[in-house]
C-alpha cells in the first residue's frame, strides 16, 4: 500500500512539473543570444527551427544531438546553412537521456553558460528536466523553444501521457549507465560514462 501511494505521489509531482513546464516554459527573452543552440534530434521541424535560430544569430554554436557530419550536411541541404554558428557534432545519442547526457558534456567541456534547447512541445518537459539534471550545479542558463505550439488541452493528448511514462525509462537508463561506469551493473555501456 505504501509503495502504491508513493508511486501515485511521484506521478502527481511529475504531472505537476510537466504541466508547469508546458504552460510556462523558460522561453528566451526577445533578442537574447546564446552560447549554444542544442537541438534534440528526431524531428525535422526541430532541426529546421534550430538552423533558423542559428541563421538569425541567436547562437554562437549549434549541435543537433544524434547527428554526425553526413546527417548535418543533409539538414543544411534541406533547411539552409546556420549562418556563422560553429557546428558541433554529437552523433551517438539514440534516446532522450543520451541526448541530455551528451549535450550536457559538450556544454561543460566548452564552458557554455547560456543554452537554447529546441525540441517538440510534448518533448519539452522530459528534455528540459534531463538536461537540467546533466547540468546540475553548473549555473548554466537554459531556455527552450518548441517547434510547434503546445495544444490548449495538452494533458489530454496521448503524447503527454506517453512522455510521463518515458521519463521513468530515461531515469532508469541513466541510473544503469552510472552503475555500469562504477562496475556495479553488468554489460557494456554504449556511451562513455561520467
Image (spheres, grey):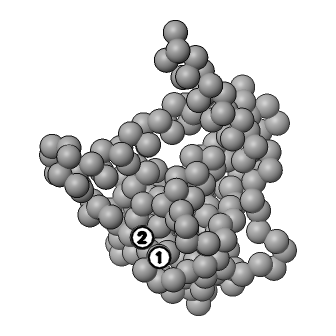
Q: Percent x, y for residue 163?
A: 56, 36
Disc sitting over residue 105 in the figure = 2
- Taking the view exactly as shown, the residue that stands out farthest to the bottom is 84
Look at the picture and state if 95 lies above or below 39.
Answer: above
Query: Is the Cβ of the residue at disc 1 closer than 8 Å to that at disc 2?
Result: yes
Q: CA distance from mark 1 to mark 2?
A: 5 Å
Disc sitting over residue 129 in the figure = none
Q: Percent x, y for residue 151?
A: 77, 39
- Taking the view exactly as shown, the residue that stands out farthest to the left is 187
Look at the picture and state if 133 lies above or below 14.
Answer: below
Write the residue at 61% across / 79% down.
113
Location of residue 48 by image quarter: bottom right
Using the image as rendered, state which of residue 83 and residue 101 is in the foreground. Answer: 101
Q: Secondary structure at mark 1?
A: helix
Q: Could one spot residue 152 in this view of the protein?
A: yes
Q: Residues within 10 Å of mark 1 (few under 14, many from 20)?
A: some
Task: Quickly name the residue at label 1.
Answer: 108
Q: Residues within 10 Å of mark 2 (few under 14, many from 20)?
A: some
Q: Secondary structure at mark 2?
A: helix
Location of residue 186 by image quarter: top left
Write the residue at 59% across / 29% down.
10
Write the residue at 51% across / 31% down.
165
Amino acid at each position: 500500500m505504501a509503495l502504491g501511494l508513493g508511486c501515485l505521489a511521484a506521478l502527481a509531482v511529475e504531472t505537476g512539473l510537466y504541466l508547469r513546464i508546458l504552460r510556462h516554459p523558460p522561453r528566451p527573452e526577445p533578442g537574447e543570444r546564446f552560447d549554444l543552440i542544442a537541438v534534440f534530434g528526431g524531428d525535422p521541424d526541430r532541426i529546421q527551427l534550430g538552423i533558423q535560430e542559428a541563421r538569425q544569430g541567436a547562437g554562437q554554436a549549434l549541435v543537433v544531438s544524434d547527428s554526425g557530419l553526413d546527417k548535418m550536411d543533409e539538414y543544411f541541404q534541406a533547411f539552409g546553412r546556420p549562418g556563422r554558428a560553429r557546428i558541433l557534432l554529437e552523433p551517438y545519442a539514440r534516446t532522450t537521456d543520451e541526448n541530455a547526457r551528451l549535450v550536457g558534456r559538450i556544454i561543460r567541456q566548452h564552458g557554455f553558460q547560456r543554452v537554447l534547447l529546441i525540441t517538440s512541445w510534448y518533448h519539452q518537459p522530459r528534455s528540459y528536466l534531463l538536461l537540467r539534471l546533466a547540468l546540475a550545479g553548473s549555473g548554466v542558463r537554459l531556455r527552450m523553444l518548441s517547434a510547434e505550439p503546445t495544444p490548449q488541452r495538452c494533458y489530454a493528448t496521448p503524447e503527454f501521457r506517453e512522455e510521463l511514462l518515458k521519463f521513468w525509462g530515461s531515469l532508469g537508463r541513466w541510473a544503469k549507465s552510472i552503475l555500469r561506469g562504477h562496475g556495479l551493473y553488468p554489460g557494456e555501456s554504449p556511451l562513455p560514462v561520467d
